[in-house]
Image (spheres, grey):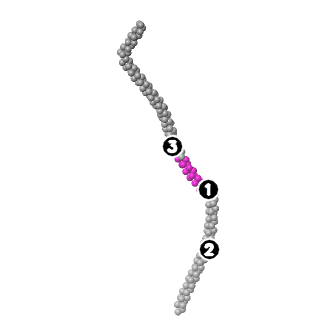
Amino acid sequence: MLTTKNLEKLIELEDKLRTEYQSQLDAKTAEIDTLTKEKEQQKERLDTQLKEISTLSTSATANKHTEQLNRELTSRGENLQEEVTTLKKRVKSLQKDLAQERDELKALKQFDPKKMKKNLDANKKKLAEKTKSADALQKSLAKSKSECAEQKRAIEELEAKLAELETDLDDDENSEAEAA
């Protein structure tokens, strides 16, 4: 019976302790629940922060890659601009060379053998025609001069005869006047 009495005392003691400490136990249980909830919330926050960090690190890596590409493209663009400038200068010099070559070709075309021979033949024909006409004019001039000279001689002869006749006529008039 002792054990029953002990048991009863133990149960009473337990009830007494429970009533005495129940509020504390409830408070501690509530605190434990609250802390457990906070711990879970912190875990959730940590998980979201980890996700954000991984997202940010991924985007940071992407940003670094984009910046690297940007630098490479800028460098490539500058190189291409330099190359374009060089090519423009080369094009200008080639255009100058082309203009000089065209001028030289034009000068050489002026001395084209076929064209020159054709011109020479045409000039020979013109010269032959002019020579013939000059010979004809020369003959005609010589003929005209000889005719002119003949006519001058004839005029001189006629003038001499006229002068003779006038002197004869004067002599006749003088002799008639003397005779009269």
Percent position (x, y) of residue 176? 54, 90
Q: Which mark is residue 143?
A: 2
**Which residue does the image show at 45% across and 30% down from the upper left?**
52
Q: Quick one: label 2, few (<14), some, or many (20+) residues within 10 Å?
A: few
The answer to which image quadrant residue 12 occupies is: top left
Mark 3, residue position: 85
| The magenta stretch spans residue 93 | yes
Q: Residue furthest top?
A: 2
| SS state under label 3 | helix
Residue 64 lies, in percent from the top left, at 48, 33
- Alpha-carbon distance for marks 3 and 1? 40 Å
Q: Earlier in the sequence, mark 3 or mark 1?
A: 3
Question: What residue lies at 36% left-to-right and 13% top-to-bottom?
Answer: 16
In the orientation shown, which residue stands out farthest toward the bottom? 180
| Contact flag, marks 2 and 3 (Cβ < 8 Å) | no
Mark 1 crowd level (few <14, some 14–19, many ≥20, 10 Å Cα): few
- Amino acid type assigned to the residue bearing label 3 in the image: Thr
- Give the x, y percent position of residue 119: 62, 60
Residue 55 to residue 137: above or below:
above
Three-letter amino acid code at disc 2?
A: Lys
Point out the frontmost of discs 2 and 3. 3
Q: Is residue 100 above or below residue 66?
A: below
* Lower sequence index among marks 2 and 3: 3
Region rendered in magenta: 92-116
At which x and y percent is residue 118?
A: 63, 60
